[in-house]
Amino acid sequence: MKAQRVLLAIVVAAATLTACGPLQVGAAATVGDQRITSEQLDNGVRDFEAAMSAAKIPADQVQLPGTVPQAVLLQLANINQFTQVGLANGVVISEGEIDAFISQQGGKASVEQALLGRGVPPSSVRDWLRASISAQKMITELGGGTDEAATTAGQQKLGLEAEKIPVKFNPRYGNFDPAQGWVPSNRFGSITPAAPQGEAPPAQGEAPPAQGEAPPAG
């Protein structure tokens, strides 16, 4: 069987996001009743930057959805939110499923390098894949099929499930708009807005990005 040649995208579908508001001390973001600490974000940023340096990928060769801290924070929030959505809907992804997907994509190094273009630190790759595979399964189950109409319906229903687990970012990291992603801020310099939320995952069978090429944002 021909290996699946696509990296699944976490669908950031109509999540309830608030750019500012009271957060627990030391929190970079809250996801439902869980929090992403500033220390977790700092560790993720260091891991990401070290991986970029080791891979000799210049920062200007990737189009991250924001600055490095913003891109990493967005991915950590996506992972947390869609992991919670999956568990709430009884979707459990085994380590074997993740291993099989990595093998189909050419191995750990290939997957890690491709996901760097999305702002995913190597230490978070398995969690990202777990959340992404879970989201893809829910889209199929909620939509009742894999054709275009079913996929669209599944994404919409998944968005409603995601709304039950709102995400709130600490304003010190910038302003996030649900429709545009991170919006320009003088404090953080010029940034590239993230792809609009609710965007469909890449079609099955689509080739993964070449090394050093930025995958679709989000």
Image (spheres, helix red, strand yellow):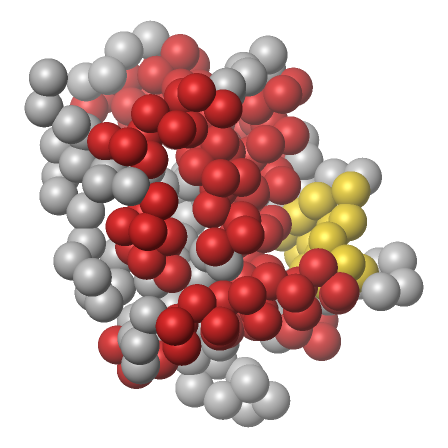
Quadrant housing residue 156 = top left
Q: Residue at x 75, y 65 (%)?
A: 38
Quadrant housing the N terminus: top left
**Residue 125 in the figure: left or right of residue 140:** right
**Residue 49 in the figure: left or right of residue 199:** right
Residue 184: horizontal and vertical position, in percent? 48, 80
**Residue 184 in the figure: left or right of residue 139:** right
**In the rendered image, the vertical position of residue 60 relative to residue 9, given as above or below:** below
Residue 107 visible at all: yes
Quadrant housing residue 29 = bottom right
- Tally the marks: 0
Q: Nearer the viewer, residue 117 or 173?
A: 117
Q: Residue at x 29, y 23 (%)?
A: 151
Residue 81: horizontal and vertical position, in percent? 61, 39
**Residue 95 in the figure: left or right of residue 55:** right
**In the rendered image, the vertical position of residue 131 relative to residue 185, given as above or below:** above
